[in-house]
Amino acid sequence: MLDKEISQAVIGRLPRYFRYLGELKDNGIERISSKDLSILMKVTASQIRQDFNNFGGFGQQGYGYNVEYLHNEIGGILGLHQKHHLIIIGAGNLGQAIANYMNFERRGFIFKGIFDSNPELHGKSIREMQVQPMENLASFIQEQQIDIAVLTIPKSAAISVAEKLVQCNIKAIWNFAHVDLNLPNSIQVENVHLSDSLMKLSYNINRAENT
Amino acid sequence: MLDKEISQAVIGRLPRYFRYLGELKDNGIERISSKDLSILMKVTASQIRQDFNNFGGFGQQGYGYNVEYLHNEIGGILGLHQKHHLIIIGAGNLGQAIANYMNFERRGFIFKGIFDSNPELHGKSIREMQVQPMENLASFIQEQQIDIAVLTIPKSAAISVAEKLVQCNIKAIWNFAHVDLNLPNSIQVENVHLSDSLMKLSYNINRAENT
DNA sequence: TAGATTGTTAATCGATTAACAATC
DNA sequence: TAGATTGTTAATCGATTAACAATC
């Protein structure tokens, strides 16, 4: 991978390509042209070819793209060929949901532990893991070589916990708290702001009704 | 609201403005200039003014913007002054988490019911609501005037359920299933694809390590 | 009034789409 | 070979930023 910077617009589309290619592969489709894929995905064939060519030529003139090969390449670009160790901080409903929804394991995201500041939850078993107190956090991250922390705690706690995670040399934070984390650029942050998403939906309902 | 179409890029930023303005308001700040807000939010002042002026002039030269007024206006644009009735379909971990994480109520999204196809869950109580069988869906939507359905079911079920919802005249679907729903344009769909989000994070971890 | 800051037009930048020569 | 389809350059479109006159 060269260092020519890929735009986040392109990155944002890669998981969707990955998903469609996975489905094609599961259906036994061997090859597909950018044109056919564009019809399936409702985007332009131009965009598909431009996107892929950010990472090199995956296709063949007159043939198209080999589905399995391309699927695998995009998986690699997305970093899915490496294993990532992750922990969940916040054992409330959302934290438990994510722990249990570990379809992610299939993609190399290994659930290693769950933490909460509430003593009542300590020792409670979630997916064969006992909820740990926050005091264990630093040593656990180091010992278990944790890459990713999932933040499913209220925003009041999120900022200070995030700073603590940075000190523990975490690589990335998957942030479900409804607050912006201002962390060093070396820490990767991906936000899932559910209420923002719901408000967008609300806007679009409104707009549809008033036109 | 006029019909000059606002780009989704702008809409996507509104909830964040709304959040910051809410916090300023809670902190007793009365007014703010686009410049100060731009520093706080780490965007350009130009963008802020352009964004707001899509909806009309909310500020005053030489003064800036009144925080409370602007907060309220943006809330209105986002449709938060109306009440929305929502149901959750899929009473698994994620569905339960969303039902319980009903901070949303504060914004006018009223949780009215939860459904699941699994008979073992029927009657189970979630936030004082009993899980209902799918057979009740159509009549319930009509009687309770449900606007929004939250889909927290596996993708295998999501497409057929979504089609059923369309027949029931639902207005909008908040889709957590990892599949694209191809529905009529009159139905508003907002996707939350958690695994896409995690893959983006994975890409950025990778990129940070290889540069 | 003078200073501050908006609303808005113009300039720039980046992303998407179209076109086509290269080539399988 | 002829047809198909990529990789890539050029053209277009849209979004962001800069600039500044209007005005509080």
Image (cartoon, coloured by chain):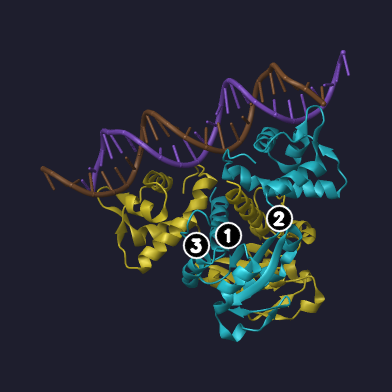
Chain colours: A cyan, B yellow, C brown, D purple
Q: Nearer the viewer, residue A139 or B177?
A: A139
Would you say residue B135 is visible in this rendering? yes
Mark 1 → mark 2, Cα distance in angstroms: 15 Å
Mark 1, mark 3: which one is toward the viewer? 1
Whether discs 2 and 3 lie on one chain: the answer is no
Q: Is residue A43 above or below residue A63?
A: below
Residue under label 1: A172
Q: Identify residue for label 2.
A: A82
SS at badge 1: strand
Image coordinates of residue A110 in percent, x first then y, are: 71, 65
Which percent across, then down, holds residue B85?
Answer: 60, 67
Left or right of residue B93: residue A36 = right
Subunit ID for the residue under disc 1: A
Q: Name the residue rendered at 32%, 67% in the picture.
A: B28
Where residue A151 appears, as percent x and y from the top left, is 57, 67
Residue C16 in the image: above or below residue B73: above
Circle 2 sits in a helix, a strand or a loop, which is it? loop
Marker count (numbered): 3
- Name which of mark 1 and mark 2 comes first in the sequence: 2
Residue hosting label 3: B80
Chain to which the residue tagged by mark 3 belongs: B
Q: Are marks 2 and 3 in contact (CB under 8 Å)?
A: no
Q: Residue furthest front?
A: A143
Q: Chain of mark 2?
A: A
